[in-house]
Image: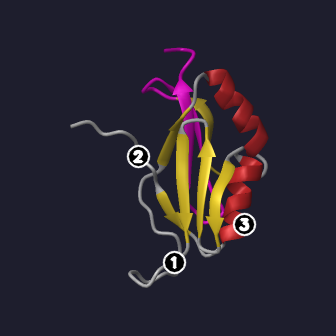
């Protein structure tokens, strides 16, 4: 039995703004979209946005940890960092970390933590 992929589903009550963040800031493409649902794609990464539902009380984004999006190279991480560092909320700045990653962390407009990284040039 093999696992094929992992697709995070993020809840938002700001659908249009959330789509705009992923499309305009992070370069995703929006596929199927309804009033309370959107498929977002960039390369082999897929993220689903969904509106709050009746199964769970909604007040703010609830999520522990972070979504780590691996990139091809440190140079690509640098290029994305240059694009987003002044327009997204920064959790931690671009750096080379002791565990061998060249990465940074930001929050989307809902507060979900997103990390982007690649192997460090120093590794």
Q: Is residue 48 magenta?
A: no
Q: Can the viewer see residue 88 in this picture?
A: no
User: Residue 3 in the image: x percent, y percent?
Assistant: 30, 39
Labels 2 and 1: the sequence-earlier one: 2
Real-space Cα separation, disc 3 to disc 2, in angstroms: 24 Å
Q: Which residue is mark 3?
A: 17
Q: Is residue 109 magenta?
A: yes
* Residue appearing at x 72%, y 44% in the figure: 27
User: Residue 22 in the image: x percent, y percent?
Assistant: 68, 53
**Quarter of the image with the N terminus in it:** top left
Q: Can the viewer see residue 109 in this picture?
A: yes
Q: Which residue is mark 2?
A: 6
User: Residue 31 in the image: x percent, y percent?
Assistant: 64, 54
Q: Secondary structure at mark 1?
A: loop
Q: Which residue is mark 1?
A: 52
Looking at the rendering, the stretch of residues picked out in magenta corresponds to 97-123
Labels 1 and 3: the sequence-earlier one: 3
Real-space Cα separation, disc 1 to disc 3, in angstroms: 15 Å
Label 1 Cα crowd, 10 Å radius (few <14 / some 14-19 / many 20+): some
* 1 vs 6, nearest the viewer: 1
Q: Is residue 102 above or below residue 122?
A: below
Label 3 Cα crowd, 10 Å radius (few <14 / some 14-19 / many 20+): some
* 105 vs 41, nearest the viewer: 41
Real-space Cα separation, disc 2 to disc 1, in angstroms: 21 Å
**How is the model colour-coded?**
secondary structure
Which numbered mark, 3 or 2, is in the foreground of this view?
2
Label 2 Cα crowd, 10 Å radius (few <14 / some 14-19 / many 20+): few
Labels 3 and 2: the sequence-earlier one: 2
């Amino acid at each position: 039995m093999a696992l094929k992929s992992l697709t995070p589903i993020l809840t938002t009550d700001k659908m249009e703004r959330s789509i705009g963040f992923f499309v305009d800031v992070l370069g995703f493409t929006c596929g199927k979209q309804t009033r309370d649902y959107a498929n977002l794609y960039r390369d082999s990464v897929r993220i689903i946005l969904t509106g709050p539902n009746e199964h769970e009380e909604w007040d703010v984004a609830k999520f522990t940890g972070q979504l780590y999006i691996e990139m091809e190279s440190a140079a690509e991480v640098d290029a994305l960092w240059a694009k987003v560092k002044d327009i997204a909320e920064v959790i931690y700045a671009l750096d080379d970390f002791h565990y061998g990653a060249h990465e940074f962390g930001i929050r989307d407009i809902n507060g979900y933590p997103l990390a982007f990284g690649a192997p460090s040039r120093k590794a």
